[in-house]
Image (cartoon, rainbow, N blue to C red):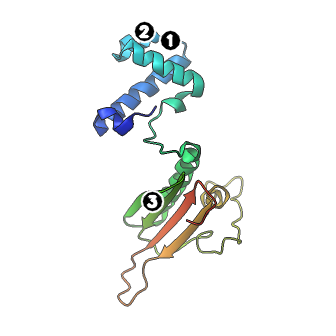
Amino acid sequence: MRYAQGGGLTLREQEKRERLRLDAAERFACGEKTEAIARELRVTARSARRWRRAWEQGGADALRSRGPVHGMAEVLDVVELLTSELVTNAYLHAKGPASLRLTALGEGRLRVGVWDSHPYIPAPFAKPPGDRVPPGSVGAGGGRGLFLVQEFADSWGGWSLGGGLLDRGAGKLLWFGVGGRAAM
């Protein structure tokens, strides 16, 4: 469900509203009546009916908040997956701060950048685009994230941000772009 500018709600109110919608989705799946759900969750019957229609068309995912789409609905799942992979890698491998930046480039294109304090740039970010990273082994607990980037992103890259005269070890920036094969 998407509401322009958060529907006039504060961030906390938006989170509460999403929890209500997802609670309603679980109840829909259990076969509860819409009116009973509205009463129990203390929402209007109109809201509960709208949520049920959305749930019937797209399941619980249709009730999740995803922010404004700006013509990029078709790339949201890929962005969510790849962003999760890069942020997880930053959390697991960097022993310091990290930062995430999303940039809408227009025409349905989006660039996601993740900065962290670790200087190592992994493949595929450190290799030319023609070089491929092999998929992780089936039984491994990890090792698939960067493979997913090269499979689903339209472009990607990385920059080392350290190694100057003062060598402060400023880390690296890894990025990927989706929503068009044009250079990002």
The secondary element bearing badge 3 is classed as helix
Give the Cα distance between marks 3 and 2: 42 Å
Reading the chain from its start, which is encountered first: label 3 or label 2? 2
Q: Are marks 1 and 2 in contact (CB under 8 Å)?
A: yes
Give the numbered dot on residue 36.
Answer: 2
Q: Which quadrant holds the C terminus?
A: bottom right
Residue closer to the observer: 89 or 173: 173
Amino acid of disc 3: Tyr
Reading the chain from its start, which is encountered first: label 3 or label 1? 1
Give the Cα distance between marks 3 and 1: 40 Å
Q: Residues within 10 Å of mark 2 (few under 14, many from 20)?
A: few
Q: Which residue is mark 3?
A: 91
Give the numbered dot on residue 32.
Answer: 1
Left or right of 139: which side holds 180? Answer: left
Residue visible at 59% across and 24% down in the picture: 57
The secondary element bearing badge 2 is classed as helix
To which quarter of the image does residue 74 belong?
A: top right
Nearest to viewer (mark 3 / mark 1): 1
Residue visible at 38% across and 36% down in the picture: 4
Q: Name above or below for residue 165 compared with residue 38.
A: below
Residue 51 placed where, x, y %? 47, 22
Residue closer to the observer: 60 or 74: 74
